[in-house]
Image (cartoon, rainbow, N blue to C red):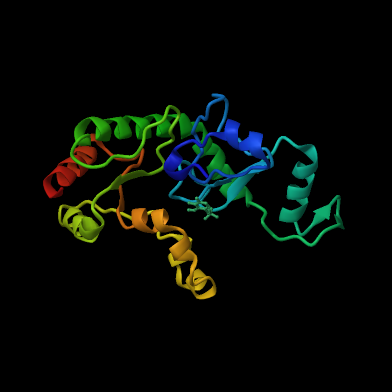
Amino acid sequence: MDYAGHPCDYVSLTARGLVLQDGAHGLGSVAGTGTTSAHGNVGSAFSLHPAKLITAGEGGVVTTDDSIKDVIVRQLRDHGRSDGLCVAAGFNYRMSELHAALALSQLRKMSRFLARRREIAAKYVSELAGRVELPAHADGHAWHLYVIRVEAKDRDSFRERLADRGVGSQVHYRPVCCQPRYRAQFPKSCDRTPIVHREWQRIVSIPLSHAMTDAEVDQVIRAVREVI
Ligand SMILES: Cc1ncc(COP(=O)(O)O)c(C=O)c1O
């Protein structure tokens, strides 16, 4: 998974075994080979949720260069049918024509959206470096999120003070082991992931969207500088 848009090292990962890429954050990222966002050797899945780089309103896309998997995925999304025959137990995961039309029009704007995200991320680096812990940079980053880190004890008040200045923020994410459903089933899993447990309490996603104006970007920078 290309967290926040930071491309994984797929050359090493795929050399070690089978990789199914969760590309929900990775669309537009360029990893090592410099070719494409799709790097899983089993396949790659992309989200078209409205918060993502491009949207279909909801839904997503699966990519593979394997013709057999292509047939299987197409069957599974359509009640397990192939040429009118039900050959597997499948689902109704078909994308509607309306959603697809929106996705296609968004696809044409993707490079523009990506370029604007990269421009805003570069501005955050130049204006916030040395003031707050910034995310690692990588060539080919898609900047789905811009996640800074503060002291865990200050994180919530930091967010409140940003909000007082009209700047919303989010936490991506509370780890799965801390989610009530999974903690109930695996009560010891948080003890086994101390770094995840420590770091998630420090993270804050500050606003980053292609739709932000320069004035809004400056407002975020000013607010972070004031409250840090
Ligand atoms: C990393 C990651 N994987 C998967 C998903 C799920 O995508 P969707 O809601 O389109 O199923 C999300 C959604 O935010 C995500 O951030």
Looking at the rendering, which quadrant does residue 145 occupy? top left
Q: Is residue 97 left or right of residue 2?
A: right
**Camera sees residue 9:** yes
Count numbered badges in the picture.
0
Is 69 placed left or right of 202 in the picture? right
Q: Name the one closer to the observer, 98 or 44.
A: 44
Eyeballing the image, is 116 above or below 133? above
List x then y, in percent, for residue 29.
49, 33
Q: Residue at x 63, y 51 (%)?
A: 95
Considering every residue shown, the one lying at the far left of the view is 226
Which residue is depicted at the point 28% across and 53% down?
A: 169
| Residue 170 image-quadrant placement | bottom left
Q: Residue furthest top?
A: 34
Could you say which is closer to the camera, residue 49 or residue 191? Answer: 191
Residue in view at x 30 percent, y 30 percent:
122
Q: Position of residue 112 (x, y in %)?
A: 42, 30
Foreground: 167 or 228?
228
Residue that protrudes farthest toward the bottom in the picture? 184
Horizontal relation, residue 192 to residue 13: left or right: left
Q: Is residue 171 visible?
A: no
Task: Report x, y in % for residue 133.
Answer: 26, 42
User: Residue 31: x percent and y percent?
Assistant: 52, 30
Q: Quadrant of residue 84?
A: bottom right
- Relative to 144, residue 180 above or below: below
At horizontal 35% and vertical 56% (from top left) the residue drawn is 198
